[in-house]
Image (cartoon, rainbow, N blue to C red):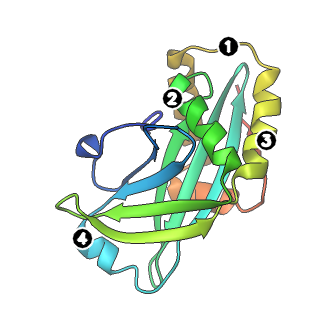
Amino acid sequence: MVPATAGKSLAHYAFGEMGFTSDAQSSSTATLRVLDRTNTIDYFGESKPQIRGGLFLQKNCAAIGMMLGIGQLVRYLYICWLDYHNDRDRQLLRALEQQTYLMVNFYGSNRQRRRLYLVDNPLIPLIEQARRHIGRLPAWTGEQFTQTLSSITLQCGDVSHLWDRLDAEVNIVQLKE
């Protein structure tokens, strides 16, 4: 699993990677970006993206996972992780908490935008709850955050299992130590 992807240049994305970017001037608008192969994006058909998220807690660390699912016959799943103690990620979470809608951009093999969607933002209640939970925890390091991501993989399985697990409006997952 790749740690936080907020603000990462599209040139550095791997195929199948999802991340966020925010408006450079105001940092008040967050946009989802996904890079995948052009033929995969064409296979989505007329389906609309669905977004789910969860707060994963382990001891004194937390990770906020955000997933996107799309596809008619085959569901394609994308995930990114945000670290509240990373300045860029925290700024992005603040922007997401204020947005009623999310813009989702899919970029194809040539890194040109292939599809654009505007979807309702279901993440607002999750981010509000996450902020409350995280406020009770001591600050953690980047290494602790990476270890928490490893624990999520071990305990929750692959992205399809995570997708199934994150089906409620607010998902808080307590990981074993």
- Marks 4 and 2, how far apart at CA: 29 Å
Q: Residues within 10 Å of mark 2 (few under 14, many from 20)?
A: some
Q: CA distance from mark 1 to mark 4?
A: 41 Å
Residue 38 tag number: 4
Q: Quadrant of the C terminus?
A: top right
Residue 165: x percent and y percent? 68, 57
- Left-right relation of 92 to 123: left
Residue drawn at x 36%, y 72% is 115
Disc 4 to disc 3, C-alpha distance: 35 Å
* Extreme-left residue of the structure: 110
> Marks 3/1: CA distance?
18 Å
Picture coordinates of residue 57 (x, y %)?
72, 32
Tell me the kind of residue under disc 1.
Ala
Sort mark 4 into few (<14), some (14-19) or many (20+) by Cα contacts within 10 Å: some
The residue pinned by badge 2 equals: 88
Answer few, some or many: residues within 10 Å of disc 3's Cα (few below 14, many 20 plus, some between 14 and 19): some
Task: Name the residue carrying label 1.
Answer: 139
Question: Considering the numbered disc 2 on the image, is that residue within a helix, a strand or a loop?
Answer: helix
Label located before the other in sequence (3 or 2): 2
137 relative to 150, above or below:
above
Q: Is residue 80 left or right of residue 34?
A: right
> Residue 137: x percent and y percent?
77, 18
Which circle marks residue 77 in the picture? none
Q: Secondary structure at mark 3?
A: helix
> Few, some or many C-alpha atoms within 10 Å of disc 1 (few <14, some 14-19, many ≥20)?
some
Give the labeled residue for mark 3.
Answer: 128
Find out whether the residues at labels 3 and 2 contact each other: C-beta distance under 8 Å.
no
Secondary structure under badge 4? helix
The answer to which of marks 1 and 4 sits earlier in the sequence is: 4
